[in-house]
Image: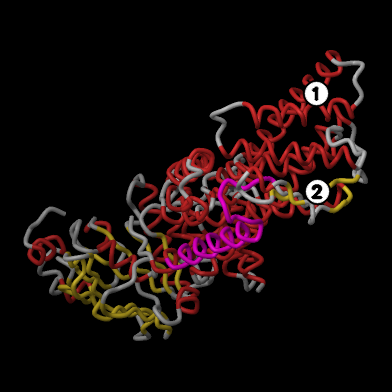
Amino acid sequence: MSVMLGLVENEALKILRRKRFRIILIVLAALLCVVVFAQNRQQQQQRRDHPERDWRAQVEKRASDLERQMNQRRGIPEQWKRWMRYESGRLRYYLSKNLNPNELTGPVFTRAFAGVGSVLLIPLLIAVFGADLVSSEFAEGTITLLLTRPVARWKILLSKVVAMILFTTLTLLAAFFLAWGISGVAFGWSGWEAPILTGFRLGGASPAAGFDLSGVRIVSLWQDTFAAWGLAWFSALAVGSITLLLSVVFRSAAAAMGTMMATLVGGTILSRVASDWDGAKWFFVTNLPLPDYYAGLPTPFEGMTLTFSALVLLAWALAALTAAFVLFTRRDVTA
Amino acid sequence: MSSSEVVLSAEGLAKRYGDREVVSDVSFALHRGEVFGFLGPNGAGKTTTIRMLVGLVRPTRGRVVIDGHDLATDFEAAMRRVGCIVETPDLYKFLTGRENLEHFARMIGDGASARIDELARLVHMDERLDGLVRTYSLGMRQRVGIAQALLSDPAVLILDEPTNGLDPAGIREMRELVRRLAGERGLAVFVSSHLLSEVEKMVDRIAIVHRGRTLAAGTLAEVTENGAKSLEDLFLEKTGGETV
């Protein structure tokens, strides 16, 4: 047990001293600054353009715009139509409860970032430090020392898995606090108690199916945010596990990282364009935006639910870790 | 000087990659307090054999027993008795020498970190231990590598081409260190090399490996027939004069 603690300490030391993790945090902070700046500009412009209008009129206009586009314009992809139907229904329900869905505060931004970030940004950052974990030991030749110490190979890999979980958690915590801290500068840090409507569902695939309000409930923003970031963390762990497998397979960190990034970007494109091909729903990238599916946003494929996506991710993560352990403990280390 | 206590034995080691048998039949035994030279031309299977001795490569046949522990079934206990440098002493370059030693001491536990300062003095690295490994010369890395190998207080030290790339002063220092470790601490030191003149000055017994098999084995006096043949002649005779 004490040796295991020492092994994890070793892995943490190596991750921190390699400086990659610090670069991740800097990239994250810089990106958040840009996004917050852009959103702030947009909000100011809207206020300048329509200073007279109150929020009810704005939301009303947005909802009816969406409904008009949905019904009039031809050639809109089915996926967009579903999203439009969802969004207009959501806005109308907020109006009926006399709640403002568009009030942008630091906490609202932080909640939204869980959804946006877990699609691509956070997985990419995880891939940057995760790809290093095993492959760098091969690339730098230190693997021969690491594996000729009186520690079984599975323990060494386990310590790397623990380090991966630890630093994925740290990345998510850093992303949360950076998102809140930076957006708060522009939009204010308070507002965690604001009521949020959650649990919207589209009735079905056809436009006639309408909007299912049976599951809608009011929660505090902090509750909603906690759930969303928890799910984002779960997605990130699945990404970390798969990255670790690639790091075992490839001897170069660049190859592992490149493969993971191509897969993430490719998978994101796939789930946007190939909405006809049902098989894509079994691909892990399609299932990463758990916080969005939790909020009730339309899924890209029929039959996907939050539970489905969580289980698919869990299966991918467990399969990846199993494969990583089998490969790592059996492989001959030559040259 | 060697007592007959065997601390490492290789028994009929063989390794096959696909159709190619890299090592066919390698057997030898290391005794306490002796320096053992493992000689052979390049491509004879030296490196693969060493990698099998330390558990990096799994033998197709045969077994390795270290201080009574079978390497295949009792890896941790067996490896606790071994320190090694396989090929180049690759340490973490972005860490200091001391941090490297602490890293590997944590893998051993049992107060191995308490030995760091003593071992640094032994290999004359105590003054430079807090510099980044990136800034070390090859000789310094080699010495930190040996300190690392001694952290678990092993019975066997395995050094793969330890004098490779060292300057004459470094070679002499390495030779003296190896002799001292065997003589004063009673370690069995396994040294692989293709530099015959180097080995002659360092070892008590040798084995010559060729085409994946151990040929001659014995004390230096035995194999050279009490100096009737030079080690070089013997080596060329056994290996058929192939390039060394």
Q: Between residue A301 and residue B88, name the one nearer to us.
A: A301
Residue at figure coordinates x 56%, y 28% from the top left: A74
Q: Earlier in the sequence, mark 2 or mark 1?
A: 1
Q: Position of residue B127 (x, y in %)?
A: 60, 48
Q: Relative to A297, does residue A43 appear above or below in the rendering?
A: above
Pointer 1 chain:
A
User: Is B224 situated left or right of B17 in this image?
Assistant: left
* Front one among B19 and A117: A117
Q: Which residue is mark 2?
A: A225
Looking at the rendering, the stretch of residues picked out in magenta corresponds to A297-326
Q: Does the magenta run of residues contain A167?
A: no
| Magenta region includes residue A312 | yes
A67 left or right of A301? Answer: right
Quadrant in the picture for residue A38? top right
Task: State how far apart marks 2 and 1 are (Cα).
Answer: 21 Å
- Is A129 or A229 nearer to us in this picture? A229
Residue at 60% across / 26% down in the picture? Answer: A73
Q: Is residue B224 left or right of residue B64?
A: left
Q: Position of residue A327 (x, y in %)?
A: 42, 64
The answer to whether A9 is drawn above or below residue A79 in the figure is below
In this rendering, is residue A294 above or below A76?
Answer: below
Q: Which mark is residue A40?
A: 1
Crowding near the residue tagged with mark 2, few <14, some 14–19, many ≥20 C-alpha atoms within 10 Å: many
State whether the magenta stretch is mostly helix, strand or loop.
Answer: helix
Disc 2: host chain: A
Q: Amino acid at mark 2?
A: Thr
Name the element at disc 2.
Answer: helix
Q: State the count of labels.
A: 2
Q: Residue furthest top?
A: A49
Amino acid at the residue labelled 1 = Asn
Mark number, residue B27:
none
Q: Which part of the image, by quadrant, shows the N terminus of chain A?
A: bottom right
